Image (cartoon, rainbow, N blue to C red):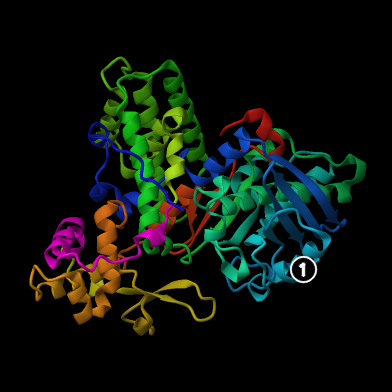
């Protein structure tokens, strides 16, 4: 699949933020969802095309055990979430990756499953890693109940009442997923097999579709159990309460290295977002509609920030900054002179001078929100044909490679890797779960199995080796003498064409926060209520406030 880079004219380039500003962890770890986030892209497509959504199968008993099928169908394609509900003893409920049983398990089936397909899936999907799925399945997922809220909602509905709004607000979801696997894992269809489909071309669309349908399942299962318990007196969730619920997610270090291992994809995500911001800033004036849209978005962001809760000290500080900055934004908008030349650029300049990183990145999201017609096409540029960038240009002169390192990796060459605090950690893959982990070099074994995720150190080592080579020598000669630099040479050549491909920080430093990597990626997913539970794992909410399948047709694009 070929993904064209969005056109950036010299005029537009004036409004683009530099990679040296955007690609620092402190800013990446302050990211907010935007209308280019992948779940928003999915909802727009589902809401503006001919997709029909139904639930043709619901075979669940009074205890809430059984299976259901949620079908998303167009004239050309059908995708079906096959959901299995289980009776899980409380002592077996765990969000850890080493868990072996869950309250619910899922797969997204490519097509309309037959009874024999469901029987095969019933033998495998509940086992997750211990089972196997086929190329007919696009994802594999599991979820656990948020026990306190789930039971509270069941009991309230069974008595014909609505659940306590404070309880709903404090948790925000009935279930949280602990994994949503795709891209060939455990036998699922490979990404390359489906990437050419228009509805799946944007990144992580099958994963987002899976989670969105899981959200519908969580409401259906809680209402089903309540009806079995309460009989004719049982109620269903009212629209506003149901709409406020999302799907929780517990995510750890397994997600963090992704954006390092996929530099072209990371570049395309960032490039799309930064191009969108530049397009907004480049406008000569503002319309009443976009001003009203910005104000409404700012009001919604302020309400979300007030409801956003975390006990992690890093996030507590960020929430303080965010709430203060959103108040400043609201005050500023109330008296903003929209008749000035290029008012959006002026607003951004004010934000850069006034707000923290949290506030600036929130302002970016707010400024994009009312400009769908101007920027939504950029979602088509967020995928990547990474294989196209795999070949190394062996004919490139060493002098040219050296120039790339001096310009694009100056930040890396400034780091002193002889200092213990700059090599304090190492990334490795756990033998038990084949998941990325972060070790402490001074106190833990395993550094001999270190993964090549510290790009800064790799480039520093490559640069040192380059000094012994004649400037006119080809890169091929360098790699013959130093094959250990092959990976670094390829990345350097990729970055020369993709300015937002690298995180401009030392990823093995003692003070590096993995949750900054997590938040960057999760913001592109569209996650809200980012809540770190340590510096290495986090809980989030997906699709809270979004329409349900029965609401899409009436609401259209998101």
Residue 540 percent coordinates (x, y): 53, 52
Q: Is residue 320 visible?
A: yes
Residue 399 at x, y percent in the picture: 11, 64
The answer to whether any part of residue 419 appears in the image is no
In the depicted structure, whether residue 363 falls above or below residue 537: above
Q: Which residue is mark 1?
A: 120
By secondary structure, the bulk of the magenta-drawn segment is best described as helix
In the image: residue 115, left or right of residue 45: right
- Residue 326 placement (x, y as % from top left): 40, 34
- Residue reaching furthest to the front: 395
Residue sitting nearer the eye, 115 or 534: 115
Query: Measured from the top left, where is residue 413 in percent x and y?
Result: 17, 64
Q: Please give the range of residues in magenta.
A: 384-413
Q: Secondary structure at mark 1?
A: helix
Task: Identify the image quadrant of the C terminus.
Answer: top right
Q: Residue at x 38, y 59 (%)?
A: 388
């Amino acid at each position: 699949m070929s993904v064209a880079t969005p056109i950036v004219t010299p005029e537009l380039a004036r409004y683009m933020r530099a990679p040296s500003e955007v690609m620092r962890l402190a800013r990446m770890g302050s990211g907010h969802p935007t209308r280019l986030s992948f779940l928003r892209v999915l909802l727009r497509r589902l809401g503006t095309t001919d997709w029909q959504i139904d639930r043709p199968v619901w075979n669940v008993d009074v205890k809430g055990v059984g299976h259901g099928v949620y079908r998303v169908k167009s004239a050309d394609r059908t995708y079906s979430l096959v959901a299995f509900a289980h009776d899980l003893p409380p002592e077996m409920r765990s969000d850890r990756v080493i868990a072996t049983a869950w309250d619910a398990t899922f797969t997204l089936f490519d097509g309309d499953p037959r009874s024999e397909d469901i029987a095969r899936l019933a033998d495998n999907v509940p086992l997750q890693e211990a089972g196997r799925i086929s190329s007919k399945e696009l994802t594999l997922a599991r979820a656990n109940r948020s026990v306190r809220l789930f039971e509270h909602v069941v009991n309230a509905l069974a008595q014909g009442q609505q659940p306590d709004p404070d309880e709903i607000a404090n948790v925000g979801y009935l279930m949280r997923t602990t994994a949503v696997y795709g891209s060939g894992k455990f036998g699922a269809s490979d990404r390359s097999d489906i990437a050419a489909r228009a509805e799946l071309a944007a990144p992580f669309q099958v994963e987002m579709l899976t989670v969105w349908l899981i959200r519908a399942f969580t409401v259906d299962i809680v209402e089903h159990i309540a009806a079995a318990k309460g009989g004719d007196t049982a109620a269903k969730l009212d629209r506003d309460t149901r709409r406020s619920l999302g799907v929780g997610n517990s995510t750890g270090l397994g997600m963090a290295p992704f954006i390092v291992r996929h530099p072209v994809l990371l570049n395309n995500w960032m490039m799309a977002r930064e191009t969108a911001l530049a397009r907004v800033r480049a406008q000569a004036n503002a319309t009443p509609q976009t001003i009203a849209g910005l104000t409404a978005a700012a009001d919604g962001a302020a309400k979300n920030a007030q409801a956003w809760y975390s006990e992690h000290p890093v996030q507590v500080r960020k929430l303080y900054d965010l709430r203060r900055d959103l108040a400043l934004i609201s005050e500023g908008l109330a008296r903003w002179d929209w008749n000035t030349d290029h008012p959006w650029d002026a607003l951004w300049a004010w934000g850069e001078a006034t707000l923290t990183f949290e506030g600036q990145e929130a302002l970016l999201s707010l400024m994009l929100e009312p400009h769908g017609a101007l920027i939504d096409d950029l979602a088509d540029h967020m995928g990547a044909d990474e294989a196209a960038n795999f070949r190394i240009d062996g004919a490139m002169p060493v002098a040219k490679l050296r120039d790339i390192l001096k310009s694009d990796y100056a930040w890396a060459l400034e780091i002193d890797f002889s200092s213990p605090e700059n090599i304090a950690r190492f990334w490795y893959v756990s033998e038990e779960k084949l998941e990325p982990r972060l070790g402490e070099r001074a106190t833990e074994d395993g550094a001999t199995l270190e993964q090549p995720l510290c790009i800064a150190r790799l480039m520093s080592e490559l640069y040192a080796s380059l000094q012994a080579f004649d400037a006119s020598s080809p890169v091929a000669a360098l790699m013959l003498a130093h094959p250990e630099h092959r990976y670094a040479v390829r990345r350097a050549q990729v970055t020369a064409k993709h300015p937002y491909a690298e995180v401009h920080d030392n990823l093995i430093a003692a003070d590096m926060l993995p949750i900054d990597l997590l938040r960057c990626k999760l913001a592109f997913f569209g996650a809200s209520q980012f809540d770190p539970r340590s510096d290495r794992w986090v809980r989030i909410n997906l699709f809270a406030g979004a329409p349900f399948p029965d609401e899409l047709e009436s609401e259209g694009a998101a």
